[in-house]
Image: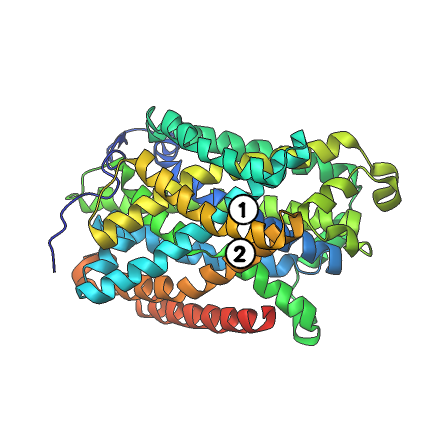
Amino acid sequence: MEPHNRQSLEEINQSVNVPSVNQSAFWRKFLAYSGPGALVAVGYMDPGNWLTSLAGGGQFQYRLLSVLALAIIVAMFMQALAIKLGVVARQDLAQAIASKLPRPIRYAAWILNEVAMMATDMTGVIGTAIALKMLFNLPLIIGILLTISDVLVVLLFLRFGIRRVEFMVLAAIITVGVIFGLEVSRAHVQTGQVLMGLVPTTLIMKNHTALVLSLGILGATIMPHNLYLHSSLAQSRRYDTHNPAQVTEALRFANWDSMIHLIAAFLINALLLILGGALFFDHTTALASLQAVFNGLKNPAIVGALASPIMSWLFALALLITGLISSITSTLAGQIVMEGYLHIRLPLWQRRLLTRCVTLIPIIIIGCVVGFSDAAFENLIIYAQVALSIALPFTLLPLVALTSDRRIMKNHVNRSAITYLGYVLALIITVLNVYLIISLF
């Protein structure tokens, strides 16, 4: 097995200074460690999440909010393990897994994860292309080809350092949250009904459609690339790795950063679900596609007096923002997977161009075969979720095993209860994803 001593994402690794243990107030330390969680949270707001949240609200109003909350809680647990691996072991998940595998299996694991990275990128491409069609009436094929130019966007922002990228992504998350907050506020939602939706019920046990949608929400929420990304970004802070107190503090603040931004991701997805429930409940045909939602928001026959071209335009703008921002995170996650499994390091622009070109091939082929339509491309998003579901167990199970290994984690090794819970959750998610795949086909 070849040695691999490179740091994960060398341009970013230990590039952000943080206060020492005995310096600065809580808030200064919190702000110094904040940022990686924002980049990870973007992965919880991609078009796959949009589709499942809107569909869940349109068909069952607010009753699947509890499923969304549960999915985010599980995501918090798994992201905390990824953070621990990065902060304590100073390895990202790809490096740590690859170090335990013989070369043939390592290459096979890379192929599986590379497909998952391309599936993640595919959802961003499709979401961006659909948003460009909504906003500027561009044909989908033109919008798809234009996404190649986001290589320049990634380069432009990354050259200014990861800290500025984190601020930019945070600004984008806030903007999207404000947009959906405005749209939901116009719908005059009954707060009591929303709060009741957070209470688990037996609905998904009695209704097959609700079960499949719930599994879709779960599958769209917990994705492999976020775990790879977080285990690497957690290493972007420069602290004394030989000082146990500083390592513990880095873990604590990194987890705060993760939880707060994942709560923000939950609120945005919840707003999407509430929007679907408030405006499209009993009008589920209006939720056939993202384009149909865009049209429905300005159609008085569907949303009544709440119809507004401005609200429709803001919906498309939010979709465009999330599609573009996800380009940065998918680029970084793809680089982490390639470096970790293959020990090959490419400049980010080459990695980005390679990933995007490979991603475009199946999109264009399918478009030529079935036509460049919203419905066809949104089906691709669903199939992308299937690819992510297949890769997920091969990410979750090793993550739990690695963070339960005392040789790697030393004093921060998982307690027995955490290890058992991690394996149980990973196995449950695997079984549910298998069921979801069977249901989709």
Task: Check contact, mark 1 vs mark 2: CB within 8 A.
Answer: yes
Q: Which mark is residue 373?
A: none
Residue 308 visible in the displayed image: yes
Label 2 element class: helix
Q: Residue at x 51, y 42 (%)?
A: 125
Q: Amino acid at mark 2?
A: Ala
For numbered disc 1, what is the local secondary structure?
loop
401 on left or right of 6 = right
Quick one: which residue is furthest to the bottom in this view?
A: 206
Rendered image quadrant of residue 397: bottom left
Spot occupied by residue 23 in the image (x, y as percentages of width and height): 26, 30
Q: Quadrant of residue 356?
A: top left
Q: Neighbour class for label 2 at 10 Å: few (<14), some, many (≥20)?
A: many
Residue drawn at the location 50% of the way across and 68% of the way down: 433
Relative height, residue 134 to residue 225 (above, below): above
Residue topped by disc 1: 46
The N terminus: image quadrant = bottom left
- The front one of 172 and 267 is 172
| Residue lying at 65% horizontally and 48% vertically, measured from the top left | 373
Front-lying residue, 296 or 208: 296
**Residue 115 rendering spot, x and y as whole percentages:** 39, 56
- Relative vertical location of residue 401 with respect to residue 267 in this rendering, above or below: below
Residue 269 % position (x, y): 60, 48
Does residue 195 appear in this view?
Answer: no
* Above or below, 98 relative to 207: above
Look at label 1 and name its amino acid.
Asp
**Residue 220: mark:** 2
> Which residue does the image show at 57% across and 35% down from the upper left?
142
Q: Earlier in the sequence, mark 1 or mark 2?
A: 1
Position of 436 with respect to 280 (left or right) is: left
Instruction: Tell me the quadrant of the picture where the C terminus can be found.
Output: bottom right
